[in-house]
Every structure is written in structure tokens, then in C-alpha cells.
Amino acid sequence: MRLSKAWLVASRDFKIFRRQKNILYSIIVFPVIISVLFPAILEFTQQRSSGLLAPGVLPNLLNSFSFFFVIGAAYIPLGIASYSIVGEKIEKSLEPLLATPLTDGEILLGKAISAVLPTLVAMYAASIVFMVGIDATTVGKLGYNYFPNSTFGVLLLILLPVAVVMSVLYSVIVSSRANDVRSANSYGIFILFPLLAIYLLSEVGIISLDINGLLIIAGILLAIDVALFFVSTAAFRREEILTKWK
Amino acid sequence: MNSSRILVTIVIDAENLTKKFGDLTAVEDLTLHVDEGEVFGFLGPNGAGKTTTIRMLCCLISKTSGSATIGGYEIGNKEGSLKIRKMIGLVPDNVGLSEHLTAYDNLDFYGKIYDCSESQRKESIKRFLDMLGIWEKRNDLAGTLSKGMKQKLAIARALIHEPEILFMDEPTANLDPESAKTVREFILELKKEKRTIFLNTHNLDEAQRICDKIGILNTKLRVVGTPEDLEQAVKGKKTIVSLEQVNEKILSALKKLSLKNLTSEGNKITFDVSDPDKENWGAVEAMVLAGGHVNTVNVVGSSLEDVYLKLVRESA
């Protein structure tokens, strides 16, 4: 596996994405919403009813907000990976690519990089805006800056990349069966359900989104990643692509 | 006597190559040899297995049985496949361009894949786009080009790393006559450069004009040889009788003679003959006895089209 070749495939995709407004929007919109909206909600709520934001309640609420970064990290690659693979399918540009000395793994890795990298950059940039915004809003109540903290660090540096990879691998499988970007996105959404379930379970107090809880979730997602890796690499083989992909 | 031997290298060598998709046999026991610098035309109806053959030879899909080597490397194993893909160029039946990249960027990307230096890439892109008459379109998005231009771009892409062996899957299909002519002339230019070209085509005239050797495939390889050899291979000729009027009585009289490929169109009747002197006499007599007024009787030789149709019909 030559990383330089995978990077070549990813670079070409980045060039294409720059000309595709839909993809640019899908990368930017979600991070902007969560990084600006949550501090704004807190500020609004603080002004309307200060009782709701008692210092004892705030940490749990902020941890819940933080988990949206994981959901976002799983959501953004769906659009990118679907376009990058289904788009090639529609343009029938995979066959000439497969006839080159690139290996299946290099092409797949290139596709994965082109979905993972913009997502991580967008989410990490959004996390900085989010932390600054939240701290500015809550420092008066808490008496200290809540972010950065180790829980959010674990979420950003461990759970978030694992969620991104899960979403990309799942998108590869979905893209191998879908005929257009829209249907790939529709099926892709299913990968968000387990993450939404985790969020709801944390809201009703069944699981906790503290460091231990996040590490357990990351471990489960990592196991899913391994399983998806084998399925997606089996789907992304030359012969499969040329003879069995719809 | 001084005898000089010219060593010819076989660059595409297939022995009993077979591909099955479940119960369906797409290609069966294909044995063929293509020499270095030769243009090999692969003819056959839709679904005959032409594209499957190209995909097997380009190591895009696996073979079910048999063997094949390209440039001395065997298809079907990982190492060989990688080496084969380095030395070949493929023009697939669908152009498969990245529509949101410019013509130049499409080619530049492929040049980078094959580790061509920047100066090599610049030189090759300019050379091939010039030869194909689309250099001025280099900064246009591929998606905005006409069908003919896209096809030319796909050909340039396959050549960007200067491969010795080029596989082309119906490169002139769906092109207007002008673009098809440019592509044909370009293939002839490549032939002058001594590249080996494996050309899938439906176009018999194109095959006859460009190819050194032709194979006719319909799951199995029916025949292979030079265009002249193939015309000779179908023994016998065709008789065309022009009458004042063709009617049912004349046709039923001829049907009793069991003539091969008897057809009528307008006031002309055509049938195949192996011995014109003998068979035409009997046929003309039958037509006259049935009340026909014969104007002319012409005997013509078989064309490549006749050979093709005969072999394809026989194998159907």
C-alpha cells in the first residue's frame, strides 16, 4: 500500500469537491450550526430563566451538547463518501481508474481520506468556536471555564475519529448498492441511529457520557469499524465493482 | 541461400481462456495470439464476450479457467496483474472521465498515477491533445465537452504513460463520422509508432481498414486471420440475379432448389453458391420456367461482412 498513491486519489477528490457546492455545504453547515447554535441557546436560556442553568445541571448539559460532535462526525462523511463513490459510478470513471496500477486498497484509502480529512478539519475547527462560545456563556455561572476538559478531549481525539471511520466504511458499503447519491444518503442515515440512541440513553440517565462512558462507546464503535472494514473491502474489489455494483 | 529470421514477439497470448458468470459462459476457450506492433480487431455481436475478454486481459476481472500472458506477464496473479496494468492503456466502452475536472487535470491525474514526471506529463498531454485536435479545450471541464471530444480525451488518457499495448473497447461507437474518422486516423498513427492495439469494434469497415488481424467472437472465437484470409475462408460466392419482376412463383421454384441464404429485395434475388457455373444454371432455368424474365446474373465474392454474418448466424 503506497500512501502517496492514496493521497493522489484523495487530492483529485478535493479538487472535485471544490467545484461541488453541495459537498462544500454538507461539510460546513453542520459544524457551523452546532458551534454557534448551542452557545446561543445557552445564552438565550440564561437570559429568560436562570433557574434552568443551575451550576449543578450545566456540566451534564454541556456533555450532552458535546456528543453532537460525534453525531456530526458521522453525518458529514455520508455526503462526501456517497458522492465520491456513487459519483464515480454515475460517471463510470472507476473502470479506467481500476485499469491503472493502483491497488484496490490504495483507491479505497484515497476515498476514505477524502471523506475523513474535511470532516475532521471542519469538526475540530467547530469545536474551538464551540468551546470559546460555551465558556463565554457559562463562565459567570460556573466560575471557571468548562472547556477544554479531559472528557471533551477524549470525545474529540478518540470517539470522533472512530465515528468518522465508521461512517466512511458504512458509506462505501451503501454506495456499492446505491445508484444515485440521494439514495446512498438515505440509506446512509441509518448509521446515525445508534449514535442518536446513545444520546437519548444518556439523556434519560441510563448511560453516562463521562470519560469512562465515552471510552466504552469508542470501544464498541471500534469493533463495528473492524467489522465494517472487512465488509467494505470485500465490496470494494475490482471484480465486484465492475460486475456486481448496480 | 542467406535466410534472415525476423523474431516476432507475441505480446498478447491467450490459451483456452474462459470466463463464466454463474451458469452463464461469457467467453469460452479463447485462444489467440497478438504480435508486437499488430492491430488486432475483435469483432462480434453485442453480448459476444468482447468487453469481458478485454477486462480479463487488462486484469480487471478474473478468469474462470485457461491462461493468458500480456507482455510476458501472466494474468490472474497479483504481481503479474500489477505489472500488466503498468504496461497497458485502456480505453473503456464508457469514457469514464471525471466530469468536474478540466480535460488537462483528467490527464495530469493519470500521468501522476503512472509516476510520469511533470515535464513528461506536460509533453504527453500537449502531444496527444494536439494530435487529437482538442488542445484548445484543455481548460474546459470534461463534462462540458462533446461526445467526440470526450472519446478523444479518453484515448489520450489511456496513452498518457506511453503504453506499448493499448486496449480499445469500441472507440468509435456513437461518434459522428468526422470524429470517428479522426479516431481511426489516430489509431493508424499509433500503428506507425509500432504500438500493439487490441481493438473491440462493431464496425467491419473500420476493422478491415485498420487491423492487421481480425478475430470474430461469439462466446467462442469463430475465426481468426487477416482480413484477406477471412474473405477467402468463406468458400463460395454470392449470385445476384436481376429480374424484371420477382413474384411468389419464382421464389417457391427457387426454394425447391435448397439454395443457401436465398433472399429477395425489389427485383433482385440473391443466394450463396459454391460452384457458380453449376448452380447458377439450375437456378436461372428454374426462374425462367416459373415465368421470370432474367435481366442480368452477377457473381460476387464474399466480403468481410458476409464472413461475419455467416459465422455469427452459424454460432447463434
Image (cartoon, rainbow, N blue to C red):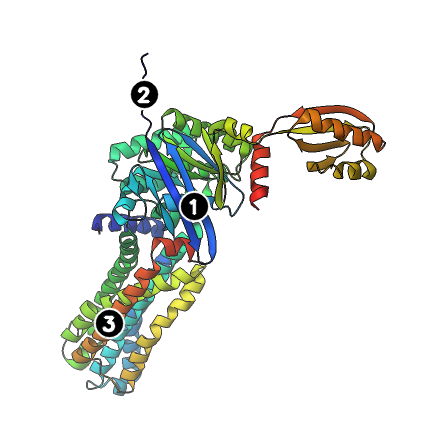
Discs 1 and 2 share one subunit = yes
Discs 3 and 2 share one subunit = no
Residue at 48% from the left image edge and 55% from the top image edge:
B24
- Quote the CA–CA distance across marks 3 and 2: 65 Å
Residue at 25% from the left image edge and 35% from the top image edge:
B118
Residue at 53% from the left image edge and 46% from the top image edge:
B46
Residue at 25% from the left image edge and 68% from the top image edge:
A226
Instruction: Report whether B311 appears left or right of A246.
Output: right
Q: Amino acid at mark 2?
A: Arg
Instruction: Report whether B152 appears left or right of B307.
Output: left
Residue B65 appears anywhere in the view:
yes
Identify the element where label 3 is drawn: helix
Q: Residues within 10 Å of mark 3 (few under 14, many from 20)?
A: some
Q: Chain of mark 2?
A: B
Where on the picture, by quarter, is residue B195? Answer: top left
**B14 above or below B22?**
above
Q: Of marks 1 and 2, which one's residue comes earlier in the chain?
A: 2
Per the rendering, the mark at residue B73 is none
The picture places residue A99, in percent across and down from the top left corner, at 35, 45
- Quote the CA–CA distance across marks 1 and 2: 31 Å
The one nearer the camera, A182 or B49, is B49
The picture places residue A150, in percent across and down from the top left corner, at 14, 74
Per the rendering, the mark at residue B29 is 1
Work out which quarter of the rendered image holds the C terminus of chain A and state it.
Answer: bottom left
**A107 above or below A170?**
above
**B244 above or below A161?**
above
The picture places residue A24, in percent across and down from the top left corner, at 35, 57
Give the labeled residue for mark 3. A223
